[in-house]
Amino acid sequence: MPVTTKVVKQPNMSFMVRIYFPAIFQGLALTGWHFFRNLTLHILHKFDLFKDVPAAVTYQYPEEKRPLAPRLRSRHRLTKRSNGSPRCVACMMCETVCPAHCIYIVADEHPDPNIEKRPKRFDIDLGICVYCGFCVEACPEDAIRMDTQILDIAAYSREGMYLTMDDLLNPENHGAIVLRDPKRPQPASQ
Amino acid sequence: MPTLTIDGKKITVADGTTVLQACEKLKIDVPRYCYHPGLSIAGNCRICMVEIEKAPKPAISCQTLSTEGMVVRTDTEQVKQVRSHILEFLLVNHPLDCPVCDQAGECYLQDYYMKFGLYDPKFNENKVKKQKKAFPIGPTIMLDQERCILCSRCVRFTDEITKSHEFGIVNRGDHSEVVVSKEFVNPYSGNVADICPVGALTDRDFRFKCRVWYLENSPSVCPGCSRGCSIEIHHNDRKSHRVEPKRVMRLKPRFNEEINKWWICDEGRYNYKFIDDNRILLVKGAEDWPSAVKTLASKLKNLAALSPQSAAFLLSPQQSNEELFLAEQIFAQLFDRSRLFLVRPNALGYQDAFLIKADKNPNTAGARALGFSYAENIVDLLSGEAEKGKLKALYIFGQDIVSLFGDDARKLLKQLEFVVYQGSNRNETAPLCSMTLPAAVYAEQEGTFTNCDGILQRFTPAFAPLPEAREGIQILHDLAVKLGIKCPGPKAREIFARMAEKAHAFKGMNFDRLGRMAQEKAALC
Ligand code: SF4
Ligand code: SF4
Ligand code: SF4
């Protein structure tokens, strides 16, 4: 096989670049500007001044949240009808399509015969969930969404990662970090 | 014997065969809603249209008789269009209920829409709404008139098969609807949910329990009465590890020309709860299985040395032929053959002229063929012997003698030195016994039953036994090994082969010939 070669030209560096002292001072100036700017702003913030000008470019997590794209898949929630009951009709499409088998639904008779079916139990085990969003795609009722923008989910036990229907209907009830009592009623398991 | 050509293939059929049946023989799929092989032909759903040469327009194949030289086409553009238009008409008033409909997944509307429909709906008007959505019409069945496509299968079933005439279709045109004349209470009511091709009639017992696509289905034999109908066990293997461990979701009839055709009775259909509920889970009276078998073997040996009459064995017609044969092979070597009693575990029940038999045991005929006959007043007999000190031990195979015979049985169990209970479900007798062995149920083991007409059917395990439970033949075989008795096993096939050599009624039979449908007739003695 013939060897093909490509001649790469060295970039032509100017004198100013080659002595590199100007670049060092440029860098120091930039760092210094940010240092003194942030220092001043932080001190001013302490006195409740210029609060709307952010001091550092880092987000002050967890007090301050980074803006997220609206289509980002975050923690699930179940949407509600106008009367507050879940929209879900327990068709189990999401449970069927879920590649991680982390959804668990038990169906029940709905008191309104025109709706017929509702979930008695709707659990998602976030410890297994792969956040693929298939459940949202599969749902014929727009009953499950992944738009809570909650990303930080932590628990002290595997059981703590289990979301019940109540958690899913009221995602706001759990602050940013889910801290669970491991002794709460657990899903039946064998 | 006309010969006709369907889609270019020639076939000769018997006189009186319809075009649809001829298509079926050629494995050509013709859609149908109202046609059911077990019912008369109604010809009202119109979806089975085919093109027949020289006929002016497409004709329904379910009602057209095959004639000599007929040329039928099922695959032309016109047939396809006709099918999709008819489907559109059938679905005009059909609600979009699939997410909440129990039929979804086994619904012919869904199947045929995906296969033959896929049209662009042109219906702009509002769908007809019924006043009442789904409502129960009896203890077993739910009716949703909005979903009904008026195929009249249910009407024909109650007119022709059960002759109870509960269903009817009233009013005309857009107003037609299927109604029941009275509460739908019928010993065969569950079948209407099976034959309804859509979700109009659904089973209340199965309602919302499980989506059908989760179900595995295993062929089996109903143990509910001596008819021994062929059934399918529908079990959910996907969810069982997370839900309360219920495996069986429902039972369905399995077509068997010689026994039950397409039907089963409700008693059999809903007789599955014992498979998962109230089971005996652990060995009692010994640490574990090996030590239980060891204790049992040494006890039986000692008793046999004492006297060949010192123990009694209560065999049950719920046991398979293999289990009964094996029990006889083992225990008749240690004790007198007359110490093996066949005891009915339940009372005689309702029967009719169609399927249901009064004898609620699947293998009475098999036990008879193996030379057993029912022992009457068994508890009185054994109590007498126990009082005299002749009887020391009892081995019970699943009979709940305390509920059957009351205090007499309780007294008997107290008098005896050693009582073994081998059974699948908890009852009043088991706790009074000195040793309890958890046995598998029919759905967990392999074997054969002989039905009331002497037809032998083989059943295979739908799933593995519960962790501690063991197959009846396995328990007996282990015991035989410990006792040093030579016997076939532990697989049903090996025991059956020996039985076919030794037992007169099973002479020359072959286990492998007993396939899914498979029957051999046993000589009933
Ligand atoms: S797919 Fe939607 S309606 Fe169906 S069970 Fe899931 S959340 Fe409920
Ligand atoms: S009958 Fe069939 S098409 Fe109609 S709602 Fe039920 S599953 Fe869907
Ligand atoms: S209820 Fe079912 S079986 Fe009866 S006519 Fe309607 S679709 Fe046919």
Image (cartoon, coloured by chain):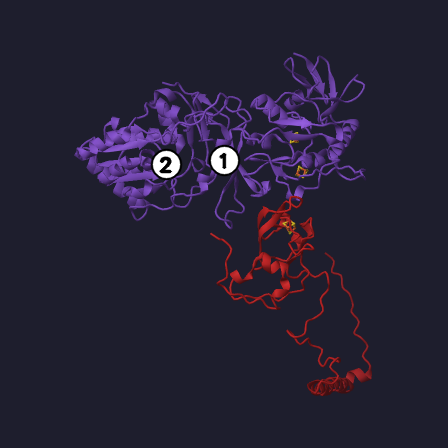
Chain colours: A red, B purple
In the image, taking residue A161 as reference, residue B382 lies left or right, namely left
Which chain is disc 1 placed on? B
Establish whether labels 1 and 2 are both on one chain. yes
State whether residue B309 is above or below residue A47.
above
Give SS at disc 2. helix
User: Label 1 to label 2, Cα distance in Å?
Assistant: 24 Å
**Is B112 left or right of B250, judged from the image as shown?**
right
- Relative image position of residue B144 (x, y in whole percent): 65, 36
Question: Type of residue at label 1?
Answer: Tyr
Per the image, the residue denoted by label 2 is B472
Which chain hosts label 2?
Answer: B
The residue under label 2 is which amino acid type? Answer: Gly
Which numbered circle lies on residue B270? 1
Residue sitting farthest toward the front = B182
**Residue B1 visible within the image:** yes
The location of residue A147, given as percent across then percent down, is: 69, 60
Q: Give percent across and percent down for residue B193.
A: 59, 33
Q: Which residue does the image show at 60% across and 50% down from the upper left?
A: A119
The quarter holding residue B66 reads top right
Number of labels in the image equals 2
Can residue B29 be seen here?
no
Image quarter of residue B138: top right
Relative depth, front residue between B358 and A43:
B358
**Residue at horizontal 63 percent and vertical 20 percent from the top:** B40
Residue B245, disc: none
